[in-house]
Image (cartoon, rainbow, N blue to C red):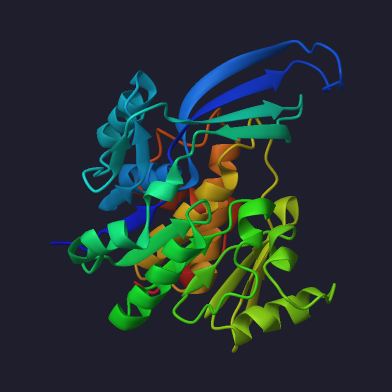
Amino acid sequence: MQKPVICIGASFVDELFHAEATVLKATTNSASVTKTAGGVSRNIAHQLALLSVPVHLISVFGSDSDGRWLKEQSMEAGVRVDASVTREGLSGKYTGILDADGSLFTAFLTNSALEWITPDYLQTQSELLKQAAFILADANISVEAVQWLLDFCKATAIPFVLEPVSVPPAKKFQGLDLHGMYLLTPNEDELPVMCEERSGLTQHQIEELLNRGVEKIWLHNGKHGSALYSRTQTISLHAPEVEVVDCTGAGDGSLTGYLLGKYLGLPDAACLRLAHTLSAEILKVNGAIAPNLTQETLLSRVADYYPDFSSLLSF
């Protein structure tokens, strides 16, 4: 039986307003609207399941119709949700305003209810967590829950991944002892707020996080690509040029691709190429999921963006 990836964190209804022209402040803007299943951890779990990776989701759903719909969307993709919490009340909602070029203008988050994922609750799921190949959490959950996961993963030698999500939740982890963390995935805005040192130099910020116990730091720089840092090496990779339809979920897709690569036993350089490829494919569709991609199709498309991919494979 294959070990699952366990994703812990947000499940939201994504309601996205796509402006027909450049967004103007303090006035009415014409837009179209789409509704999709979202939430960082839920998105990653959903896409991993579509790519034939066994996955469990520990999240919080409301008892309303949106909560039932979010569960159905996840389970239809192949995600196990029986370790999640269902609470009385409304489900979480992410409302995004997208500019005419597909970029995010602003967004609102309501009813996340992720305070239900406590250390005590995670302890009740410890037998499931012990089975994990990887444990991923998004920074929407509490510092206390992340600290419990760090301690758990350090004791069990399970690789633990933290996705900072955005600047406000990332700030919570400033100064936290990060020993036990396999991978941290900030972008250029989230990286400095997680550091205590006030240096504006990226290298100093990376060194601080490595000294605080992180094994690898994967810094995302949007259209400029990304760089993976460890104590022994730095791997940089350019991002493919694609016509953006919707930027929602591109970062989630990138991390999904990396986790798929690691699950398949690929080296970091190949994992980054797989990650950027999945992100590019998601940028070309509405919503945070590329629903028609299989594992085989995705692997075949990497060479379209990165012709050296096959030379990096370890199997």
Spot occupied by residue 278 in the image (x, y as percentages of width and height): 51, 48
Q: Nearer the viewer, residue 216 or 140?
A: 140
Spot occupied by residue 31 in the image (x, y as percentages of width and height): 70, 13
Identity of the residue furthest to the left in this view: 1
Q: Is residue 69 above or below residue 261?
A: above
Q: Is residue 274 above or below residue 16?
A: below
Spot occupied by residue 155 in the image (x, y as percentages of width and height): 31, 82
Which quarter of the image is occupied by the N terminus? bottom left
Spot occupied by residue 166 in the image (x, y as percentages of width and height): 64, 51
Decide if residue 44 is in sight here: no
Q: Count the numbered circles shown.
A: 0
Q: Residue at x 81, y 17 (%)?
A: 21
Which quarter of the image is occupied by the C terminus? bottom left
Q: Nearer the viewer, residue 132 or 300?
A: 132
Q: Residue at x 67, y 52 (%)?
A: 168
Q: Is residue 313 left or right of residue 157?
A: right
Q: Residue at x 76, y 27 (%)?
A: 99
Q: Is residue 44 left or right of residue 121?
A: right
Q: Is residue 253 above or below residue 157?
A: above
Q: Is residue 150 left or right of residue 211?
A: left
Dividing the picture into quadrants, the one containing residue 134 is bottom left
Q: Nearer the viewer, residue 71 or 44?
A: 71
Q: Residue at x 33, y 42 (%)?
A: 50
Q: Nearer the viewer, residue 31 or 211?
A: 211
Decide if residue 172 is in sight here: yes
